[in-house]
Image (cartoon, rainbow, N blue to C red):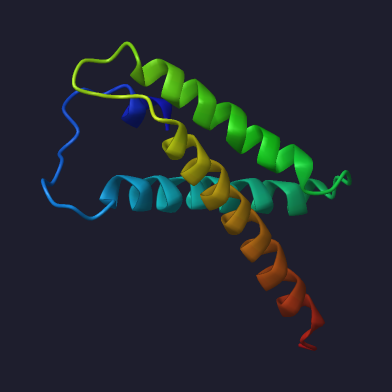
Amino acid sequence: MLFLGGRSDVPTVDIDLPLDKAAHLFLYGVLGILLAIGWLRTHRGGGLPWPVLTVFLVGAADELNQRSVANRSSEGLDLVADVVGGAVGFAGWIRLDSKRRRIPE
């Protein structure tokens, strides 16, 4: 994430749709899924706050990093999209996994 966020040559499309926010939702959703896979493999308790905090910290680091990169901007709504995408990815994978475990093999 920080590698992509630190690049100044990221391609952009000049349209009125918020593709930037969709990209944040998608990429951080993938991060949320990866966190969920790790969370399930380690069987750690503690609830949803830790993975969401992890996504928030990575997103905040990314946004702070983008402040110093040419042709990039740092926006609060990007961080919101990061956290929402990560939380949805995490919760969605946990739910999918719990449904899969209920089905007898």
The residue sitting at the right extreme is 45
Depth check, front residue: 15 or 63? 15
- Residue 90: x and y in percent read 64, 54
Residue 17 sits in which quadrant?
Answer: bottom left
**Left or right of 86: which side holds 36?**
right
Q: Is residue 38 above or below residue 64?
A: below
> Residue at (63%, 65%) from the top-left corner?
92
- Residue 50: x and y in percent read 76, 38
- Residue 102: x and y in percent read 81, 82
> Residue at (16%, 27%) from the top-left corner?
9
Numbered marks: total? 0
- Residue 76: x and y in percent read 46, 32
**Left or right of 81: which side holds 5?**
left
The residue sitting at the left extreme is 14
The residue sitting at the top extreme is 68
**Left or right of 95: which side holds 58?**
left
> Residue at (73%, 78%) from the top-left corner?
99
- Quadrant of the snapshot with the N terminus: top left
- Quadrant of the snapshot with the C terminus: bottom right
**Left or right of 51: which side holds 42?**
right
Q: Is residue 100 above or below residue 1?
A: below
> Residue at (36%, 47%) from the top-left corner?
21
Depth check, front residue: 86 or 94? 86
Q: Is residue 83 above or below residue 92?
A: above
Depth check, front residue: 35 or 15? 15
